[in-house]
Amino acid sequence: MAEAEEQESGSLEESTDESEEEESEEEPKLKYERLSNGVTEILQKGAASCMTVHDKFLALGTHYGKVYLLDVQGNITQKFDVSPVKINQISLDESGEHMGVCSEDGKVQVFGLYSGEEFHETFDCPIKIIAVHPHFVRSSCKQFVTGGKKLLLFERSWMNRWKSSVLHEGEGNIRNVKWRGHLIAWANNMGVKIFDISSKQRITNVPRDDISLRPDMYPCSLCWKDSVTLIIGWGTSVKEREYCARPRLDIIQPLSETCEEISSDALTVRGFQENECRDYHLESSEGESLFYIVSPRDVVVAKERDQDDHIDWLLEKKKYEEALMAAEISQKNIKRHKILDIGLAYINHLVEKGEYDTAARKCQKILGKNATLWEYEVYKFKEIGQLKAISPYLPRGDPVLKPLIYEMILHEFLESDYEGFATLIREWPGDLYNNSVIVQAVRDHLKKDSQNKTLLKTLAELYTYDKNYGNALEIYLTLRHKDVFQLIHKHNLFSSIKDKIVLLMDFDSEKAVDMLLDNEDKISAESQSNTGHYLVTGSLCERQAACMQKKEVTSQERKRGSRSCTSIKKVVEELEDRPELQHVYLHKLFKRDHHKGQRYHEKQISLYAEYDRPNLLPFLRDSTHCPLEKALEICQQRNFVEETVYLLSRMGNSRSALKMIMEELHDVDKAIEFAKEQDDGELWEDLILYSIDKPPFITGLLNNIGTHVDPILLIHRIKEGMEIPNLRDSLVKILQDYNLQILLREGCKKILVADSLSLLKKMHRTQMKGVLVDEENICESCLSPILPSDAAKPFSVVVFHCRHMFHKECLPVPSMNSPAQYCNICSAKNRGPGSAILEMKK
């Protein structure tokens, strides 16, 4: 029987009930383990009858009258042979230095564990309970109580003699007793009583609830929650008793009906088939959250679960994500678990469930920067054929895995998913893998599918990473890819596009032309830079250096112009077979600079006439280099009236131009506008002569020529009896225009007179101002001081309005023909700036 018991599992969590508790998802509050070591040896020889717990050790009594002191691991530290029969109860004081023991044969012993102090007494009936004073170590507290058929209090007198007194009797056997502070609580067949040792009186009585339960089969359990609160467990009820200092002490409080049972575990202890309710005892350690479940053949320790236990339970229930979160939150408190181990277990769990994408995503957080673990997981995903799932989450910077890892994934995509392969090439930096290996692999696939645009585009990107820009450019142009211009600009590939201009123009003529015009110097043949360096010292050489620098700048500008012309020539020649593209290029060139492509202006006339007539006339107006005869010939051949009119007028043949407007366009308004632009009287005369027999033309002339030609010239030539549309309105308009002209002239006259008068007044005020004459002024003729040194001497000074001063005697004497005097310096004529004078005499 003992061997069978030894083979039972040590973990009570595995021996819990296999019904509802195992299926419940609620986490238990406590964890359990058997007290082993010395306890196992003791219980193999005999059955446990009672146990009491101290913070420092345990005391275990057996059915064979032995008491063992154990450490918290269950190792035996001391052994006492108290009686040959069952030990009923053991009691310890708070210091753990004194112990009281009672047995079934009526023996009672109280002795010091570390002293020779001892008390022995044998009664004629079994003693069921004993409790020593919590402070028994003190000389004033040498007290203990025992209980059989009555409750006895033993006290040691001042002469070291023990005397006993009966605290209670007559209600059956005393079943349990607990002593806390000055209060003693005991239970008998009728209920629970509490005695106050300090006042020597019983203070309350708690009757038994269910009298149908036999007290010997269902004993009462007592536990002091604190020094004033007693918890009573009896049968199916639990009560709480609180002691207060007020005279009213009957304050029994049953548990509220709303209280919940927070932990309920069914334990399988050794020999449970032979045990009864009274064979189980529950003891607790006040210093630690430990509970001891004592049965005859087993002692189980219940502990509060810590964070490690919580994680164990989550892992057992396969709640890996919650376990990982709990470990991260309490990483400083957990001892048995590692976050990484939990994370790896979580990844494995997700893989087993087939949630590959979630598993791959979790790798980022769990594996972090551990390159070795990353590589291990990648190979694991490869084994199950799920490299695609982990590819989006692979590290790309810190850490960087072996190139083989990335190449392996790229090959996987290349075999089955071209789009996914292209996405990885775009997203992954080119230094993660061996570019040449991947390029060769793509080229091998293109041999099977040479027109696959996805592969071609990806190959171009690989060439770009490998700085093989020429091949990349070829592919982009073949695909007509939008990034071709960006590639050219970014990597300065202008020298490589000389023979690819047609392809670029076919793809996007606007962008191509802008690029060609913006980078003319780069597209043209490279020329040696001719940068001069001069060292000039001394102020004498500064002008020479400036001249040299100016010449150098001029030379550089000339070279740039030459390179620009070379570039234009190459582009035009390249587009010779595509005149429509040639026109687009030359048109944009002309818009930017009217003179840069002047040698092609003659060619552009035909191009505009063929592909872009709306812009032909603006071109003819803005260009100063196109041959007018050639342009006129082309326009006349194509019957371009407006352009022909413009060219005729520009060549001085205004009459032919006007005639074409009248005869070809029949547009009097345009004819009038043309005549206004030319401002030629003969043209007006021709226009009047042509219109005189055409009433609609006469109406147009009457409405528009009033500001340029005298309308009388037209009115006198109108034949009598000719019906002219809206003649009255036209005449009214002529009169209105005439009146408007008169009003404008009068207004201008008034403004002119007002301005003249204002300026005259201003001049008069200016000339009336005084002029300062002092010793510093000189005579402009003799150059001597204007004022004499002797102030008493009479003098005469002439000051002109031009501020020049003369001695009067230094000026010519006025004659009869010219009585006025003028400034000899400012006046070369009779009337000049110095014609007016100011004369000062003394």
Image: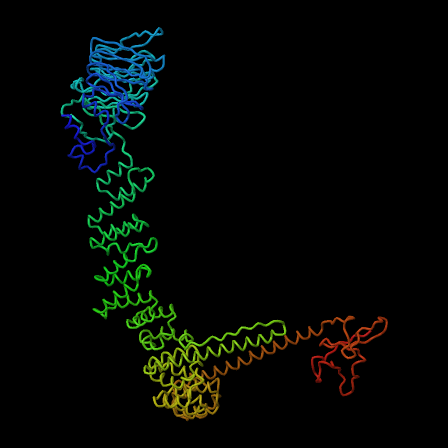
In the image, farthest residue toward the right: 792
Image-quadrant location for residue 578: bottom left
In this picture the colour scheme is rainbow
Viewer can see residue 90: yes
Q: How many badges with numbers are in the image?
A: 0
Q: Is residue 777 left or right of residue 310?
A: right
Q: Residue at x 24, y 45 (%)?
A: 345
Q: Nearer the viewer, residue 194 or 525?
A: 525
Comparing 126 with 116, the one in front is 116
Q: In which quadrant is the C terminus drawn?
A: bottom right
Q: Is residue 680 above or below residue 326?
A: below
Q: Is residue 109 left or right of residue 801?
A: left
Q: Is residue 481 above or below residue 22?
A: below
Q: Could you say where residue 176 lies in the image, as x and y percent from the top left?
A: 23, 17
> Within the image, what quadrant is residue 460 found in?
bottom left
| Quadrant including the N terminus | top left
Residue 722 picture location, percent across and down = 39, 91
Of residues 605 and 727, the one nearer the viewer is 605
Image position, residue 830 (x, y; %): 71, 85
Instruction: Pinpoint residue 595: horizontal percent, then vertical percent.
Output: 45, 81
Residue 669 shows in this picture: no
Whether residue 74 is situated above or below residue 400 in the rendered picture: above
